[in-house]
Image (cartoon, grey):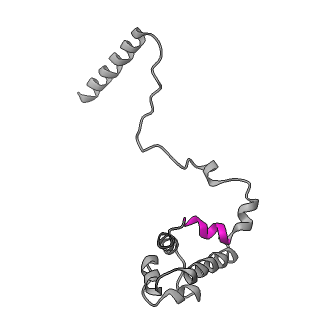
C-alpha cells in the first residue's frame, strides 16, 4: 500500500475513533494498543496494524473491510476484479475428499463398494 493510501486509511481510522462511543481507554483495549498510546497512532509514533483495525471493527461492530472501502473508495470503483474471483472465499475443509454421486446399475454400485472395502482393508494391513 502506498504512503498516500496508508494516510487515507489512517484518517478513516481516526474519524472512527473520534466518533466511537466509550472512552479512549476502551478503544485502546479493543485495538490492542497500550493505554495512553492512541494518539501515537495518529502522529506516526505507532504503526497501524491489521490487529488494531480488526479490534476497532469488532468494538464498533462493523466489517473491518469498511476501513478500506471508505478510505479507498476511488480505487474500489475502478478496480476491474474482485478478490473472490482470484481465490475461493469458501474453500472446503482440508483433506475432505469429494466423491462423485453414484450413478449406474446395481452391479456398478456393488463393484464400487467392493473396491472401496477392499482398499480400506488393504490400507489397514
Q: Is residue 31 left or right of residue 4?
A: left
Q: Give above or below for 54 relative to 7.
A: above
Q: Is residue 7 left or right of residue 102?
A: right
Q: Quadrant of residue 41?
A: bottom right
Q: Which residues are magenta?
A: 63-71
Residue at 46 percent across and 77 percent down: it is 31
User: In the displayed image of the protein, which residue is found farthest to the right?
Assistant: 78
Q: Is residue 30 left or right of residue 10?
A: left
Q: Give above or below for 55 relative to 106.
A: below
Residue at 52 percent across and 74 percent down: it is 49
Of residue 77 and residue 2, the one placed in the foreground of this image is: 77
User: In the displayed image of the protein, which residue is found farthest to the front?
Assistant: 21
Q: Quadrant of residue 117?
A: top left
Residue 61 locus on image (x, y percent): 50, 68
Instruction: For the N terminus, give its image quadrant.
Output: bottom right
Residue 33 locus on image (x, y percent): 45, 82
Instruction: For the C terminus, give its image quadrant.
Output: top left
Q: Give above or below for 84 relative to 25.
A: above
Q: Quadrant of residue 80?
A: bottom right
Residue at 43 percent across and 44 percent down: it is 93
- Magenta span dominant secondary structure: helix
Residue 14 locus on image (x, y percent): 59, 82
Residue at 33 percent across and 16 percent down: it is 114
Q: Is residue 89 left or right of residue 94?
A: right
Is residue 54 on the magenta stretch? no
Residue 17 locus on image (x, y percent): 55, 81
Amino acid at each position: 500500500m502506498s504512503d498516500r493510501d496508508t494516510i487515507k486509511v489512517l484518517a478513516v481510522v481516526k474519524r472512527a475513533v473520534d466518533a466511537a462511543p466509550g472512552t479512549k481507554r476502551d478503544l485502546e483495549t479493543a485495538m490492542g494498543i497500550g493505554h495512553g498510546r492512541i494518539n501515537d497512532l495518529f502522529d506516526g509514533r505507532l504503526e497501524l496494524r491489521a490487529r488494531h483495525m480488526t479490534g476497532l471493527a469488532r468494538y464498533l461492530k462493523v466489517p473491518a473491510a469498511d476501513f478500506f472501502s471508505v478510505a479507498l473508495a476511488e480505487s474500489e470503483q475502478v478496480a476491474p476484479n474482485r478478490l473472490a474471483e482470484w481465490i475461493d472465499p469458501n474453500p472446503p475443509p482440508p483433506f475432505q475428499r469429494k466423491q462423485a454421486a453414484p450413478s449406474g446399475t446395481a452391479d456398478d454400485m456393488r463393484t464400487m463398494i467392493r473396491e472401496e472395502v477392499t482398499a480400506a482393508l488393504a490400507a489397514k494391513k
